[in-house]
Amino acid sequence: MNEYDFAERLAWSRGQRSNTHMETIQSLIAGCASVEQTTPELDRKGIDYIARLRGGAALAIDIKERSKGVSDHWSKSPLFNQVEPELTLEYWSVMPYEDQPGVVGWTLDESKLTDYVLYTFDPVDTQEVFLLPFQLLRMAFRRNAVDWMTHFHPKTCTTNGGNGNGGWTTQSVFVPAWCVIEAVADQMRTNLSS
C-alpha cells in the first residue's frame, strides 16, 4: 500500500507538464482549435482540460498521468509479445470502512462529466498515450470489473487529506492497455437479439 498527500499529487498532476498535455491533446483531436486548462473546481470534478473544436464543440478531458518507473511492473502482452502499458481503473475513490459506505471510483462514476480520458506516462516508460471515450470506458469497466479485479489484482493506496482533513483509501486495478481497448471496442458492437 502506498501513501500520498492529496494536495501534493494534485499539484503534480497540474504542474510543469501542462503544456505537454495541451500539445498532446491538440495533436490527438482532429479539428481542435484550442486547449485550455480548467479551474480547480472543474479539476476536482475530473475535468483537467477543455478542448475546443473549430466548429464550437467543447470536449472535457481528464488526464491520468503515471509517474516515472511504472513500467517496472508491466507484464508481457500475449498479443504483442512485448511489455504492455497498463491503464489505471479506479474501483473505489474512497473504500468502504466500518459503517462508512465508500465512494465509487472515477472509472465507474455515472455522474462524471468527462468526455475523454487521456492516459500519459513518463517518456522513460513509454512514448504511447491513450485517449479513450469515458462513457465507453466506464461501461467496459462495469462489465469486466469482477474479472479484472480478480485477474489483475487490485492495489490500494492510502492518501492523507492534507491540511488536517484526515485520509482515505482508494482501490484501483492496473489492466494492460490492449485488454481495456478491446473491452471498450466490445461496448461499441453488441448483438441485441435474444
Image (cartoon, helix red, strand yellow):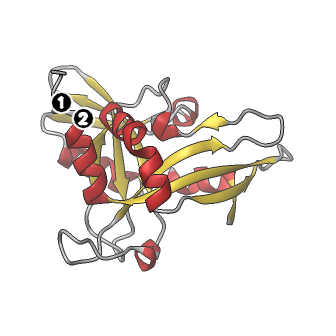
Tell me if residue 68 comes above or below residue 48 in the rendering.
Answer: below
Name the element at disc 2: helix
- Categorize mark 2 by other alpha carbons within 10 Å: few (<14), some (14-19), many (20+): some
- Residue corresponding to mark 1: 190
Q: In the image, what residue type sits under mark 2?
A: Gln
Q: Determine the image quadrant of residue 71.
A: bottom left
- Residue corresponding to mark 2: 187
Name the element at disc 1: loop
User: Where residue 35 sits: x, y (%)?
Assistant: 31, 38
Is disc 1 in contact with disc 2, using a CB cutoff of under 8 Å? yes
Residue 172 vs residue 32: left or right? Answer: right
Q: How far is mark 1 from mark 2, CA to CA? A: 7 Å
User: Where residue 148 sits: x, y (%)?
Assistant: 43, 53
Question: Residue sitting at 45 percent across and 39 percent down?
Answer: 48
Residue 130 vs residue 142: left or right? Answer: left
Question: Foreground: 39 or 83?
Answer: 83
Question: Residue sitting at 51 percent across and 50 percent down?
Answer: 14
User: Where residue 180 sits: x, y (%)?
Assistant: 31, 51
User: Where residue 144 sits: x, y (%)?
Assistant: 38, 44
Question: Residue sitting at 22 percent across and 49 percent down?
Answer: 182
* Image quarter in which the N terminus is found: bottom right
Question: Foreground: 142 or 137?
Answer: 142
Q: Determine the image quadrant of residue 37.
A: top left
Q: Can residue 63 be seen in this view?
A: yes
Q: Determine the image quadrant of residue 44.
A: top right
Q: In the image, what residue type sits under mark 1?
A: Thr
